[in-house]
């Protein structure tokens, strides 16, 4: 397994960035979180004039063996059906990407069935879904390593086109179960605090899901805080490919747009492998999925939006992207007190 040589942004430019923000024609701090976002963007790009090039969303899809245990409101075949919907342009992520001029690639990381008739779907299939981790590890160590590298190679391709902003999304019936277990193992939060209703389970369904996952964790030797062991035993191919994509994007000094609960779980694994990845991450929203607020706190994430979303697909990334544009635009286009001939507070 290769290491991920991520270099944190050089903080030497911080004072100059802050001066540029503070001397815009506005009261100090009056653009709130947009100012934090502008500062982060300028540090990531190491310039006082950051630009956004070819923003793109990667949506990774895969099936989960644990879905056979009835942990979801929807049957496993919905994963395959939704990928076809993505390819046809009819899903929410398609709509929001079109609205905000974001590129979109749909990746088959491990969906049961073929998409040979759909050239719009990128074939990065590891296998026809993971094993049911209620009984055996979700994947082999070799499959996990392959998934990480496939995600990384996709980012290399995008970076070569000039892309410097990347959003990550996912689709996979059962993947909130995988994400909840990863959160539990890598943060130490009780499993009950990590398990939610996913795609719409009622209270009884959530209780069954929690019982199933509790038994699944107990059925394996402890993997503790080891991120790769946790990912191999309980993860999904789409989660692993997202993780690899996040790590490589940070290596490439790209801005990362983080979606909801599953994407945040993938980031949790990435951050345990290379903590410097977090400096490149914009947390787009706080999901309505139970556990996401705690997971954001664990990652130090301050979400841009709180809309009660729990869809996945990268929809939070696409919806938050105009705020990233706004942060870049005010930093580079808004007049300063001096250039506008306006008296600032210090001169009055």
Image (tube, rainbow, N blue to C red):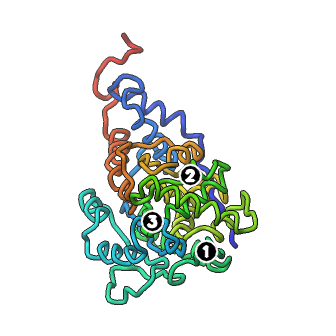
Element at label 3: loop
Q: Give x and y (percent) for residue 209.
A: 53, 61
**Image quadrant for the C terminus?**
top left
Q: Is residue 243 left or right of residue 114?
A: right
Q: Is residue 255 visible?
A: no
Q: Residue at x 49, y 79 (%)?
A: 110
Indicate whether 124 appears above or below 259. Answer: below
Q: SS of the residue at dot 2?
A: helix
- The one of 251 and 313 positioned closer to us in this rendering: 313
Position of residue 202 measured from the top left corner of the image (x, y, whole percent): 41, 55
Residue nearest the observer in this picture, 114 or 234: 234
Q: Which residue is mark 3?
A: 72
Q: Residue at x 35, y 51 (%)?
A: 321
Write down the residue under mark 2: 194
**Front one among 133 and 125:** 133
Marks 3 and 1, how far apart in space? 17 Å
Q: Secondary structure under badge 1?
A: loop
Mark positioned earlier in the residue sequence (2 or 1): 1
Counting residues from the start of the chain, the first of labels 3 and 2 encountered is: 3
Residue under pointer 1? 138
């Amino acid at each position: 397994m290769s290491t991920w040589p991520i270099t944190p942004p050089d903080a030497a430019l911080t004072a100059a960035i802050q001066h540029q923000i503070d001397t815009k024609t506005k009261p100090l701090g009056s653009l709130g979180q947009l100012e934090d976002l502008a500062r982060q963007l300028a540090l990531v790009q190491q310039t006082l004039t950051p630009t956004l090039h070819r923003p793109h969303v990667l949506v990774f899809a895969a099936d989960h063996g644990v879905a056979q245990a009835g942990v979801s409101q929807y049957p496993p075949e919905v994963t395959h059906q939704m990928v076809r919907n993505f390819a046809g342009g009819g899903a929410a992520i398609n709509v929001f990407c079109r609205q905000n001029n974001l590129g979109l690639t749909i990746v088959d990381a491990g969906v049961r069935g073929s998409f040979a008739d759909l050239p719009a779907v990128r074939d990065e299939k590891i296998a026809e879904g993971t094993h049911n981790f209620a009984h055996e590890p979700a994947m082999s160590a070799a499959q996990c390593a392959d998934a990480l590298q496939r995600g990384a190679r996709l980012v290399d391709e995008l970076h070569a086109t000039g892309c410097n902003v990347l959003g990550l999304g996912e689709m996979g019936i059962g993947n909130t179960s995988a994400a909840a277990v990863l959160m539990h193992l890598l943060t130490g939060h009780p499993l009950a605090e990590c398990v939610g209703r996913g795609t719409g389970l009622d209270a009884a369904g959530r209780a069954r899901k929690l019982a199933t996952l509790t038994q699944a964790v107990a059925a394996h030797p402890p993997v503790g805080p080891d991120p790769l062991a946790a990912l191999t035993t309980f993860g999904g191919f789409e989660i692993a490919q997202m993780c690899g994509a996040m790590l490589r994007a940070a290596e490439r000094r790209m801005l990362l747009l983080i979606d909801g609960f599953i994407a945040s779980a993938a980031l949790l694994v990435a951050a345990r492998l290379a903590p410097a990845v977090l400096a490149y991450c914009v947390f787009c929203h706080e999901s309505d999925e139970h556990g996401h607020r705690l997971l954001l706190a664990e990652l130090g994430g301050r979400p841009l939006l709180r809309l009660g979303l729990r869809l996945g697909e990268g929809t939070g990334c696409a919806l938050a992207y105009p705020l990233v544009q706004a942060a870049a635009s005010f930093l580079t286009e808004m007049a300063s007190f001096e250039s506008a001939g306006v008296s600032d507070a210090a001169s009055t």
